[in-house]
Image (cartoon, grey):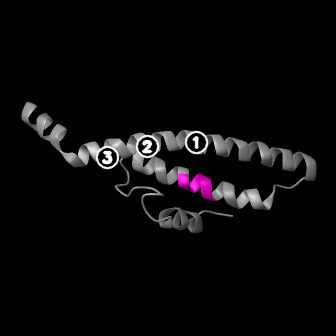
Amino acid sequence: MQEDINQNLQKLSTWKRIFFMAIFAVMVSLVQIVLQLIILLQIASMLMTGNPNTNILGFGKKLSMYLYDIVLFLTFNSERLPFPFSEWSLTETLEKKSPR
């Protein structure tokens, strides 16, 4: 058991994953702040015009898909590093599958 733990601690891939997880944990916080601003802007748009702002609507959808992509990585449901360390492709794929 102790030998297995020592081997896991010595794996470069383990430490590399932890490093990227720390980066993306910070990214989650930043993305959430931006999403909260988008929510407030959409509420303001609904109150003033009766409709959501279509420009912000698309950006909010892409940003929420990006957040989902990061969460998949952080919860070990994906080995693929999210953008900017890889292509934006998964986010685009998720966007095509989602309604609206």
Q: Is residue 75 visible?
A: no
User: Which picture quadrant has residue 39?
Assistant: top right
Residue 28: where, in percent of width, then height? 53, 42
On the image, the x and y values in percent for residue 80 come to 37, 58
Task: Characterize the local packing of mark 1: few (<14), some (14-19) or many (20 or more) Cα atoms within 10 angstroms.
Answer: few
Labels 1 and 3: the sequence-earlier one: 3
Which span is picked out in magenta? Answer: 62-66
State the mark number for residue 30.
1
Considering every residue shown, the one lying at the far top of the view is: 2
Q: Do the residues labelled 3 and 2 touch (CB within 8 Å)?
A: no
Q: Position of residue 21 (x, y in %)?
A: 39, 43
Quadrant holding the C terminus: bottom right
Which residue was labeled with disc 2? 23
Q: Which residue is drawn at 49% across and 39% down?
A: 26
Q: Based on the displayed image, in which of its 4 quarters is residue 34 positioned?
A: top right
Residue at screen point 85% across, 50% down: 45
Residue 10 visible in the shown view:
yes
Q: Does the magenta run of residues contain 1?
A: no
- Looking at the rendered image, the quarter that the N terminus falls into is top left
Tell me which secondary structure the magenta stretch mostly adopts: helix
Label 3, on which residue?
17
Residue at position x 12%, y 40% in the image: 7
Circle 2 SS class:
helix
Q: What residue type is labelled 3?
A: Arg
